Amino acid sequence: MSAQEFNLEVTPILPEALKRLDELANNLWYSWNIQARQLFEQLNEELWIRVGHNPKLFLRNIDQRRLDSAVTDQSFLDAYKQVLASYDAYYHAKERRNGGKQLAEDDLIAYFCAEYGFHESLPIYSGGLGILAGDHCKTASDLRLPFVAVGLFYHQGYFSQRIDAQGNQIASYNENVPQHLPISLVVDEAKQAIYIDIKIAETQVLAQVWKIQVGHIDLYLLDTNVPQNNDDDRKITHKLYDSGKDIRIKQEIVLGIGGVRLLRRLGIAPTVWHINEGHAAFLILERARELITQGQSFETAIEAVAANTVFTTHTPVPAGHDHFSPEEVKNYLGAFYHHDLRISEEQFMALGSLPNDSPDFNMTTLAVQGSRHRNGVSRIHGDVSSKICAKFWPEIAPKENPIRHVTNGVHVPSMLAREWTNFFDESLGVEWRDHKCDVDFWQAIENIPDQQFWNIRQTVKSRMLAKVCDSLTAQHLPYQISETHLERLLKYIDPKNPNILTIGFARRFATYKRASLLLREIDRLGTIINDTQRPVVFIFAGKAHPADGPGQDLLREIYNKSCLPEFMGKILVVQGYDLGLSRRLVSGVDVWLNNPVYPEEASGTSGMKVALNAGLNLSVLDGWWPESYDGENGWAIKASPHHDNHHLRDDEDARSLYEVLQDEVIPLYYDRDKDGYSEGWVKKAKHSMATILPRFNTQRMLNDYLSDFYLPASRQGRRLNSDNYAKARELADWKANLRAKWSGVEARPLSAPQIQMTSGESINIQVAVRLNELQPTDVAVELLLSHKVYHPEVLVPTQEDLQNIWQNNKMETVSYRFVPEHPLHDSGEYLYNLTLKPDLSGGLSYRIRVFPYDEVLVEAHEMGMMKWV
């Protein structure tokens, strides 16, 4: 008979001299300050690893005697004082930096996201979206921006991953215990928990609120796991990205509607609202409800809300956007739109579903229609998103519709290895932190002595290999493999001899990321891997969503191939991918492999993290990589032209991958001189670091958001919301009038076009526009002039051919605006005149178009209406 186990926790007491360790453990500043984390590690390295690098849990479990002895440990006290000095200097510096100085004194940015990835000690993230959100918040703190973030507190968060002996992913969920995390319950003046009330269907759901300190900024998390709720509603915030549709829509109601009510309850008044992916788009409805309650019309409310709402989409695949059936929406939000928004079911569904589109209520559709500032997360993704969203502006060419882009970046202090941080401090001075976006400053990397550069790289790589060895040992021992077999498995990743080319692939195991592309031709891969003179090791890590069968199949396929005798120890699959493992892999691998299906990678940031640690990228030209790749700072896999034939496409991409590895990557790595390293490799790695670090960091990213989105959103919000929303009412009425009369607008040229002129001359062009009772200033008449596109192979082009030629013409285009002159009483039209003096010469072509225009519009083609002459 086994004994019953009883739990008992004895909480150690911090000595007075170390009291502020608790303060450090409760501010996520530690997540991007290496010295702060090392402080805890220095007290007890084994415990630090055992608690998952969680300072809060560490302080609850450390031996009292170790704390007491630390008070007399001068080395530790010196490190402690140094960290506190850095923390205080950071915390007391309040002045806004960079573009933040242009914000108004009372500006405040509210940032909503479904997940946040700051550090492995706070597991409320699943992948790239969360890591990006965490980096966004960290950088907002670094720049001292007026910024608040809102999310959900998941009691289980995302799953932990084990891989069994057959390569099956075993998902398990660990409970997030608030007492073990750097969070605190938000209470009122009487020290009682505050609750946010959200009606979902016929039930009043309550959410308590947790606060997380992220440097200078606050993150608030809503949590429905409170005794006052029924069992089903307590589970709303139980699990991140629950696969059940009913839970998913409830989560998004709590995040969007509840998030706005939370900020109001705390007296926080944002002037800019940023929806990071469509999960939080219901905040548009709650903000509209507030204005309708104040007496504004629904149309006015939407204009006022959209004016200062920023929407970032991260999903390049149409199927990746959340959508809910009309029945679900009616069930959970019927009372909200009938009684609170005071609109019909048809009007409400139109916010999330366009005519001739799916009848489902789409969260991206709501976000696009309820915002005026929208962006993708790389240049290519901006173009892809413009095409996906073309249905919102059907008369506008995708390249001109109001979807722009801000390319993602990474938070340098979070991902830069400690060896590089220390080296920069010594060689560049601590002021390097103030030059993160200064391209010229980082040219100094080219001057680092090659041997010193290589030595740092090898030191970082050794630490990475040690981590992988430990992880693989812990992964395989439960399945009772022999010590001999384990030694064979780890043979090629010796931390003491890190001279084998090591290539990493670590990310979410989604099918479009094609983790198994490397395995497409096994014999050829075997030739590459098993060259005794130039061996290669591939390290794979990543999770497939528990509901993603094909993703788990990919993981299993790679694992089983790694067990083949010819690949043993050369292809390694590491379980438990999280931020901790990620930091080691991206800092230590020689090459980062990225081979998604083009153009389905929205941005991708892991390759940026590799580059800032002097690793090299081998990637399909998708996401961020085409904006960085210059031919000398990594390698590119040119996309196959066979977009419509997946089999041929994958064959060609795999062949390109093998060729680049065999012809360029491997020979360069092993072209070593007498000092034991490749001069060409070091040159390429330096160039990668110097060109990528200053351009693909989150400080540059936040400055782009400030100049292109936050500042315009703030100004537009103030403009439309002033004088009791007078401008918002005017704009709503103006748009309604335009929509009602647009079908009757027509335009025609008044004279035969002149086909010959001399450079420097002017010609007069006149257009008559039937305004259908609109005012002359309600429309813009514009001429677009471009060099003529010669297509001799198109003998009789159709109108559609000409339209495509025009829209896809990448040559310079110059626009000219016509001036409204006077009515043409005989025809009931209005005369618009242009005196054209072309800035171009040669064979030219021009087209004339008419579109709605008002100076208060955020984007020229916001209405999505256009007529061509």
Image (cartoon, rainbow, N blue to C red):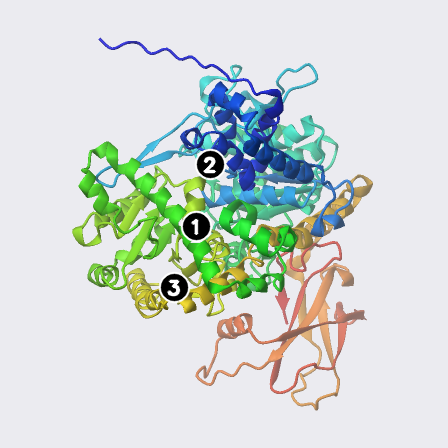
Q: Which mark is residue 120?
A: 2
**Does residue 826 appear to the left or right of 91 in the view shown?**
right
Is residue 259 shown above or below 562? above
Mark on residue 460? 1
Q: How far from the left and from the top, in percent, is residue 573?
A: 30, 46
Q: Earlier in the sequence, mark 2 or mark 1?
A: 2
Q: Is residue 380 above or below residue 363?
A: below
Residue 36 figure quarter: top right
The image quarter in which residue 257 lies: top right
Q: Are marks 3 and 2 in contact (CB under 8 Å)?
A: no
Per the model, the C-alpha gap separating discs 3 and 2 is 34 Å
Give the label on residue 606, or none.
Answer: none
Q: Mark 2 to mark 1: distance in Å?
A: 20 Å
Tell me the quarter of the image containing the N terminus.
top left
In this view, the mark in front (2 or 1): 1
Structural crowding at the residue carrying mark 2, measured as other residues with C-alpha within 10 Å and reported as few (<14), some (14–19) or many (≥20) = some
Q: Is residue 817 above or below residue 70?
A: below
| Number of marks drawn | 3
Residue 629: x %, y % from top left:
48, 65
Look at label 2 and name its amino acid: Glu
Q: Quarter of the image holding residue 777?
A: bottom right
Name the residue: 25% across, 41% down: 167
Q: Amino acid at mark 1?
A: Val
Label 3 environment density (alpha carbons within 10 Å; few <14, some 14–19, many ≥20):
some
Q: Which residue is mark 3?
A: 677
Q: Closer to the N terminus: mark 3 or mark 2?
A: 2
Q: Nearer the viewer, residue 808 or 748?
A: 808
